[in-house]
Amino acid sequence: MIITICGGGNAAHTLAGLLSSQTGIIVRVYTPFDGEAARWQEGVRTTGGILVDTPTGQRIGRPQLISRDAEEALSGARLVILALPAFAHEIILQAIAPYLESGAWVGALPARGGFDMGAGAALSAVKAAQVTLFGLQTLPWACRFERYGQQVIVLGVKEQVDLAAWPPAQAPAIAARLGELLGVPLNPVPNFLSLTLADTGQIIHPGIMYGLFHAWDGQPYPTQLPFYQSVDASIAEILQCMSDEIQNLCTQLELCSPGLDLETVRPLSEWMLRSYRAAIEDASTLQSQFNTNRSYTGLLAPMRPVPGGFVPDFQARYLTEDVPYNLLVTRTWMLLVPRSCESYAAVSLNALAFAGALLVRDERQLEAIKRHGPMNVLPQVGFAQEDA
Ligand code: NAD
């Protein structure tokens, strides 16, 4: 079986090492981003394969091909796995669409929110109908590559993970085969909406970042803060409130749509125990489930070095991936802003711009906005009414 892994980060390293260590599996890696294919090839040449250090031992595997060329990387693949942050899904799906074989399984680890809709748009309706889409609720591992293209550390393995598919009837077959390949039990769930709502990244990452840094005074911290181990009672309360909101939303959606099954969208604490029960020393509170989870040991908050210490990195994946850019939410209304592109005149314009906050990084960007005028800039990243 030929499996193509799309991506060049932590998850892609783990998958490439684990899958290519298995007999009968040919692994190809497609990574067009930022010179990664060349660096990864160099790494594999040095060590002879990718070493995966897991809590239960070492595995080593060597992909047959690592390439930035979609055609050669996708040729003959029956299973295509996107191991990427959500903001890269559509970019990669557009690049691989012409080379996807009819009947292939194409999915994301993890899917995050709205993967089925994004994939449908990126692949075109015809291509999307020729493949089976799937997504996992989360990545089965907490992992970080140690040396690029050479070694990855798996800090923890989740005890089970949910999987959705389109068409939904395919979910049990994909869960069984993929679960076997990954060595993690996968539970088929009835719909992709369950994955969108059960995306714990959208609770945990922005919730902890807010808790840690909302009162930051602008001064550097002497050291980089732990991330999950920094969850205190007040941060746990923030996470609990976010989880409760999603549970309320599920209740309302099920009331409005008889037959809709969102049972697998679990409260955060229940998800922690299903995913990590054996790794958690003290399961008595949500706070202790984070603080005493061995799989999270050593993971640090995204911060960057500056003279005198470290400052929060608000451009890190924990925010850029996990906060929905196109959505404005208040207690009384929500506004979804369809955008045709991410920026204009090099100024990034997210949904906040449509609420009047055009955020610039420097004088040059400020001048560009002044020159064009804010009301002329907004239509450049939006859609005309009839297209929306
Ligand atoms: P990562 O930050 O290591 O992935 C970065 C990679 O994504 C890059 O190396 C590149 O290959 C690709 N990429 C980034 N921007 C791109 C762009 N603009 N165009 C094309 N490719 C681009 O991420 P990861 O740790 O491998 O995580 C992958 C997914 O798994 C994410 O959704 C993450 O939230 C989730 N996740 C990761 C972990 C973990 O422990 N690593 C745990 C739970 C969930």
Image (spheres, rainbow, N blue to C red):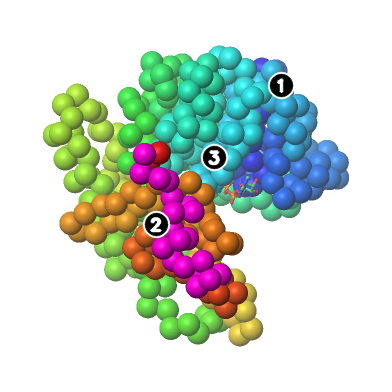
Residue carrying label 2: 351
The residue lying furthest to the right in this view is 46
Residue carrying label 1: 75
Quadrant for the C terminus, please. top left
Give the structural element (helix, strand or loop) at label 3: helix
Q: Residues within 10 Å of mark 2 (few under 14, many from 20)?
A: many
The quadrant in which residue 113 appears is: top left
Measure the C-alpha gap from mark 2 to mark 3: 20 Å
- When the figure is inspected, residue 156 is found, relative to residue 76, above or below; the finding is below
Residue 29: x percent and y percent?
70, 34
Instruction: Kindly identify the amino acid type of the residue bearing the numbered disc 3.
Output: His
Front residue of 104 and 183: 104
Residue 388 seen: yes
Residue carrying label 3: 89
Residue 382 in magenta stretch = yes
Q: Which residues are magenta?
A: 368-386
Q: Is residue 309 left or right of residue 216?
A: right
